[in-house]
Image: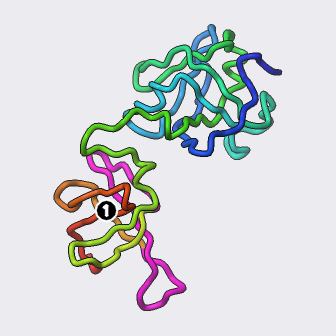
Amino acid sequence: MSSPALTPAQRPADAVELARVLEAWGIKGWVRILPFQADPVALVHSAQWWLEPPEARFVRGFSLFSACVQVTVAEVKPHADGWVARLEGVNDRNTAEALKGVRISVPRSAFPPPADGEFYWVDLLGLDVINREGVNLGRVTDLLATGPTSVLVLQDSDPADSAKTIERMIPFVDAYVDAVDTAARRITVDWQPDY
């Protein structure tokens, strides 16, 4: 099975995986998608998506395509408690069903600029976290959404045993975060190593 809308393409070097296709929605080729963030602004505003086959652990026997493909997004809109999308050239339920589990990426360079004081999670990954006293607390490896607050997850080497790592979690709120400098790849916090 193939579709002229699914154009083989090289995955952009700055591509960020933002969502997955959950299932077909309706009979006209729409799909339900699962964005990985509460406000999928970059996904919704992108005119092009890059799709990759689902991981085998999610969908077995996927055969629609074997490498990255590029698609034109016709429409994305909220529906009930989720999101649905219509892709150019995907006009029937069978093709939409065949997309189940597909991973959706968008180049970071295509993201709209964030508002002042706001950051895309992908821009925080890999930043060093330093406290006010200049102590390096680790590097951001993940962010957790815990309701109204996001939490920075840091990895650092254990001072007692350099072969081991320790994990720290710092709420990403003004009370603890003094400054984020993405150009310098650093976040300054009011946090102590023994918290």
Query: Where is 192 relative to 90, above or below?
Result: below
In this figure, which residue is indicated by the disc labeled 1? 187
**Is 112 or 4 nearer to us in this picture?**
112
What residue is drawn where x is 39% and y is 44%? 120
Q: Main secondary structure of the magenta part?
A: strand
What residue is drawn where x is 26% and y is 72%? 131
- Tell me where residue 2 appears, x and y as whole percent: 80, 21
What residue is drawn where x is 39% and y is 61%? 185
Q: Is residue 150 magenta?
A: yes
Residue type, label 1? Ile
- Tell me where residue 184 appears, x and y as whole percent: 37, 61
Q: As drawn, is 18 to the left or to the right of 94?
A: left
Which corner quadrant of the image does residue 98 belong to? top right
| Secondary structure under the numbered disc 1 in the rendered image | strand
Residue interval drawn in magenta: 141-166
Q: As drawn, is 14 to the left or to the right of 11?
A: left
Query: Where is 162 relative to 132, above or below?
Result: below
| Residue farthest left in this picture | 175
| Residue farthest bottom in this picture | 160
**Is 64 or 24 nearer to us in this picture?**
64
| Residue farthest front in this picture | 183
